[in-house]
Image (cartoon, rainbow, N blue to C red):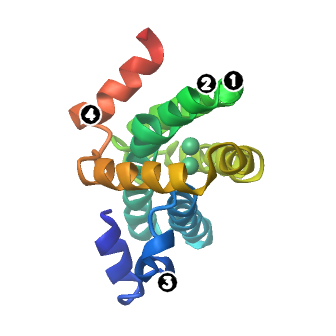
Amino acid sequence: MHRASVASRRGGYSHPMATTKSASTDAIVLLKNDHKDIRRAFDQFEKAGESAEKAKGKLVDQIIELLTVHTYIENEVMYPRVRALLPDLEDDVLESYEEHHVADVLVMELSTMKPSDERFDAKTTVLIESVRHHIEEEEQEWFPKVREGLGRKALQEIGAEMEKARKKAPRRPSQPSALKKTIDAVVS
Ligand SMILES: [Fe+2]
Ligand SMILES: [Fe+2]
């Protein structure tokens, strides 16, 4: 889901940061906004009833799109920049790439399934649990260290670069730029 359409689904609500130019491209603020959208979709999936197959199918489509875009901009911009600028955080970055890879595999499998499939709910639940854990680690442990190490100006520059990457980000795991990420995780 493109950010614009996420905003329109919320009745045209746009995040207040979007109008505050000085803070609008802070990489951590942008990533936390994405996390909020992702968590909301997770909560909605969990609240949908056991038999709400149509709603769950739509929500999983939305989750797939949100995660495909988000992991792309982190993998393409945030993680390599942080790794280059803050070598002490290399282990965290490598662990995060692997957690993205686990999510990519589940997302790829889910994208070929129907909500009526026996494993659909179970796979989505495992995806949600694993991504929630990952997001928590990013927000609680990783982002504070990154903010302290990089400072405001570098974060604004990285954020601007991420927004550029977002425009060409894949929306489905079957797109070549998303597949490349999955292959890189195994062979590079
Ligand atoms: Fe991440
Ligand atoms: Fe993230």
Residue 117, horizontal then vertical, whole percent? 44, 46
Is label 3 in contact with label 2 (beta carbons under 8 Å)? no
Foreground: disc 3 or disc 4: 3
Residue 35 is drawn in which quadrant? Answer: bottom right
Residues at marks 2 and 1, CA–CA distance in whole angstroms: 5 Å
Tell me the quarter of the image containing the N terminus.
Answer: bottom left
Residue 164, horizontal then vertical, whole percent? 29, 52
Left or right of residue 101, residue 115 in this image = left
The residue carrying mark 1 is 91
Q: Amino acid at mark 1?
A: Asp
Q: In the image, what residue occupies the spot 41% across and 82% down?
A: 19
Residue 138, horizontal then vertical, whole percent? 67, 47
The residue carrying mark 2 is 94
Q: Amino acid at mark 2?
A: Leu
Residues at marks 2 and 4, CA–CA distance in whole angstroms: 20 Å
The residue carrying mark 4 is 177
The residue carrying mark 3 is 16
Decide which of tag 3 and tag 4 comes sooner along the chain.
Answer: 3
